[in-house]
Image (spheres, rainbow, N blue to C red):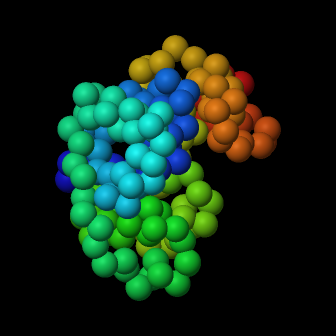
Amino acid sequence: MTNLWVVDSSPLIVLGKAGQLELLAKLAEKLVVPAAVIREVTVRREEALLMEFLETLSPLQIEPNGEVCPEVLAWALGSGESQVISIAARLGVARAVLDDLEARRCAKSMNIRVIGSLGVVVKAKQMGLIPKAKPIIERLRLVGLYLNDAIVNRALAQAGEK
């Protein structure tokens, strides 16, 4: 199986605003972005530019919106999250990239491997793609990703920085 990741809007936006969008491209062989997510991230010009930048970094597959899995419908998630999880289930991808807690729980209940923006930074550090995780994690918080101190401390420990 190819190292295919299906990406939701929040990771695209926060990693982009933190100047770390290239980490997604370095960690996955191919990124799949549902049309619903494209619609969400191209509403504002600044975020539309993030998508253009991402296309220069990685093989990017825009996946048309399809039928949402019945298991996903029961969770009453947003359109983007619902498409990410349904596409991940249909394609049997390596990971779904989601920050929303309920979406992550839904994906895990369907045995879909999940990673979020914070996990992307930790994985990049573990793989030697970045020298330090802490400054990037601090930047993620500054650009709007809510991370409590306990989660940050756990992530830093996983990254070998605590």
Q: Nearer the viewer, residue 94 or 64?
A: 64
Above or below, 128 relative to 31: above
Residue 141 position in % (x across, y down): 69, 34
Horizontal placement of 64 versus 25: left or right? left
Dividing the image into 4 quarters, which one contains the C terminus?
Answer: top right
User: In percent of the image, x 31 and y 34: which residue is there?
Assistant: 52
User: In percent of the image, x 36 and y 70: which residue is there?
Assistant: 86
Q: Is residue 58 visible?
A: yes
Horizontal placement of 140 versus 17: left or right? right
Residue 46 position in % (x across, y down): 47, 34
Quarter residue 60 falls in: top left
Q: Is residue 95 visible?
A: no
Residue 85 position in % (x across, y down): 41, 66
Above or below, 75 relative to 4: below
Toward the top, the furthest residue is: 131
User: In percent of the image, x 37 and y 80: which residue is there?
Assistant: 69
Q: Nearer the viewer, residue 67 or 28?
A: 67
Count of numbered circles in the view: 0
User: In percent of the image, x 79 and y 38: which residue is there?
Assistant: 149
Q: Nearer the viewer, residue 154 or 48?
A: 48
Residue 81 position in % (x across, y down): 47, 63
